[in-house]
Image: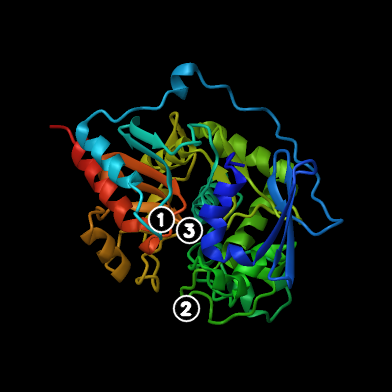
Amino acid sequence: MSGTPREQAYRELLAPMGGALLNIRVDDERREVSTRIAGFAQSRAVYLDGAGCVLTPEGVTLAAVNASAAAPKPSPEEDRVVEPASAALRAALDRAFAETGSTPHRFTKAVVILREDRIVAERYAPGVGVHTPLAGWSATKSVVNALLGVLVRQGWLRMDAPEPVPEWSPSGDPRRAITTDQLLRMQSGLDLGESLRTSFIVMFDPSVQMIFLHQDSARIAAAAPLGAPPGARWNYTNANTQLLSRILLQQAGGTPEAFLAFARRELFDKIGMRDTVFEFNVAGTPIGASHLLASARDWARFGQLYLHDGVAGGECILPEGWVDYSAAATPGSEVYGYGAGFWTERGEGEGQRYRRARGLLADSFMARGALGQYVIVVPSERLMAARLGIARTERDDADTVIKMVREAIEATRPR
């Protein structure tokens, strides 16, 4: 998807996660990759036009998705990389891209910084450009937040209403009480692992197996039992977002093509996300927990929507008050500081105090994904920063990224 040479992809992404245990076979003609893990488990990914890469067993395929109307081609001026306007900004990007002398590495791929709706600095690693789609991993959850907001604005969804999950329809099922808000805030109480780690050991976590080993992740999520009453406990698990993804699919028309048309028409096209790919599982459900790829500029445009309180081009894309709702801290998440599909500094939890002590402002919030994907929104400064990469450094390189954002704020403040 990103045009990365396979040797580099293996070295940066797979080798640190136990890649030596993988037996990998690449078939360029069939556009697929098959793997075996230590000889006891196997998987197969197939590239499909319009749908990215789909994990599918032999003999089972998801029909190729029509990519529909292509986004307008950018002008040559829009393809030019915006160089930092000051020495201070250049130094901030230098530090963000500076590689460690030994493992673990940060492998920064792209940074885009906007101030007052204008790109003031951007930089890309070799082989990455302004149109290269880069994995957002769990930053995808924030895009699910936006699509849910569209449905709320249109009157098709209420966040405080029970989630319409068919598997929970029998009377007496306590999961019937779970609301859409509780799923988005990771307070559903569903007991299906947790999705906060990125190491080889996560292959044994049920929330990871749900995404990578099962054809229908939403069905697996719907089958999860309650580990706590709805609303009583915060637990970050992909199961919640996969159920929300199925709701989005159903509301959009029930097919991958209908979902993509909805996402483009109501969100991507309106905010200028041109190089964005949403991936699906074999059942045809978007993998909203983790599988959206977009260029760094597209991620920045997404953050800009939240910087503008959900308004783009003079049109309200998100409901009034939706951004503050998304950034409001969720009880129980204090160790990390989580809102509704976003991580947030608007609270007094341990995670929020840690990040603020290192420079993030108190009104900030962010889309965040594993291995160092960040889309940080700072409303009081009219600034946002997107950082994409494959960071293995401590806390997914959060300290380095926070320092970059703080330096960017100071370098671009009006004098």
Amino acid under disc 3: Ala
In this view, the residue in front, 211 or 310, is 211
The amino acid at mark 2 is Ala
Look at mark 2 in the image and give the residue it sits on.
232
**Image quadrant for the C terminus?**
top left
Q: Amino acid at mark 1?
A: His
Identify the mark nearer the N-term, 1 or 3: 1
Counting other residues with Cα less than 10 Å from the Cα at mark 2, is it few (<14), some (14-19), or many (20 or more)? Answer: some
Report x, y in % for residue 296.
Answer: 46, 39
Give coordinates of residue 348: x percent, y percent: 27, 67
How far apart, in angstroms, are the residues tagged by discs 3 and 2? 26 Å
Q: Is residue 234 visible?
A: yes
Residue at mark 3: 370
- The answer to whether residue 192 is above or below residue 347 is below
Q: Residue furthest right?
A: 59
Measure the C-alpha gap from mark 1 to mark 2: 38 Å
Secondary structure beneath label 1 = loop
Query: How far apart are the alpha carbons under marks 1 and 3?
Result: 14 Å
366 left or right of 133 in image: left
Residue on which the image places disc 1 = 105
Residue drawn at x 26%, y 65% as measured from the top left: 354
Q: Secondary structure at mark 3?
A: loop
Mark earlier in primary sequence (1, 2) = 1
The residue closer to the viewer here, 326 or 214, is: 214
